[in-house]
Amino acid sequence: MKKQIILLSSLALISFTFGCKKVAGPGGTSSIKGNVQCTFIGNNNPAEKEVTSIICNHANGISGSILDNSDYFLINTPGNSTNYYVWYENTNWLGQDPALQGRTAIKVTYSNNESNVTIATNTAAAILAIAGADFDVSRTNDVITLTNKIAGEVADANDVNTPFVIDVLNQGKNSGGAGANSYSGPAVDEQVYIIYGDEDFYGENVRTDAQGNYQFVGLVKGNYRVFTYSIDTLTSNFTLKQIETSVEITKNKEVVTASDLKVVL
């Protein structure tokens, strides 16, 4: 009987010991510290669409300004996904397609007695018919305005051998490109969050200091996840994504340094 009491007492003690074992969370003597580094692109540096102006000079009587048979100009898209050449065939004789390798042809027919406005009207219609998936096309009198539908860096349009005046009204830019507002260094005053063990929600949050450092104190042994938020530059509307690192505390009074969190802001 005495042995049974001792055995039951031992089992109860073991059960109590394991039952009182602390899981990841507050109430301990250990801490987690780390650093957040950022690339700041700012609100003034989003991706931009290229806008191009094409003035259809033809019938102004100035030497060298007459549109010739088989003349062409070039228009381009970001990433060179599909590039085009716009070429002209005079209705009075057979023109020769330049047949530029790696480019899609856009043919425009014209006659010598047509006005600049007519040539601009026909050119805009031809571009819209063939390249409407890549460009928004508008026209005012003899001026055509092309806007790339996809934002980003793009090779500028080139008048090649036409008498047209081609000018870039807005330069295409990739998001996050280097500029006056770009910055790389510590992420200052950014929120950092910690998740205890397998919990679904964060248990505590702190802010980084002037050097981008943060620290969570008073933690027990266990597994933790530390995270912050970053702009997702692969999305057009700059949605946020979670940047996370995992940390384990294995003993009391331990200071664990987490991997750096690198974000875009």
Image: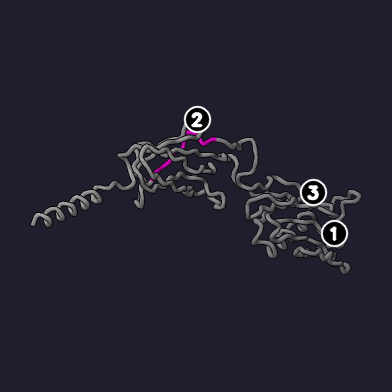
Judged from this view, the residue extending furthest toward the right is: 63
195 or 231, which is in the foreground? 195
How far apart marks 1 and 3 lie (CA) works out to 14 Å
Report the span colored magenta. 186-194
Task: Please determine whether, in this image, residue 30 is positioned above or below residue 12.
Answer: above
| Amino acid under disc 3 | Val
How far apart marks 2 and 3 lie (CA) works out to 52 Å
> Which mark is drawn over residue 71?
1
> Which mark is drawn over residue 232?
none
Answer few, some or many: residues within 10 Å of disc 2's Cα (few below 14, many 20 plus, some between 14 and 19): few
Locate residue 13, reporting x and y percent. 19, 50
Colour theme: one colour
How far apart marks 2 and 1 lie (CA) works out to 60 Å
> Which mark is drawn over residue 210?
2
Locate residue 110, reporting x and y percent. 81, 63
| Amino acid under disc 2 | Ala
**In terms of secondary structure, where does tag 2 sit?**
loop
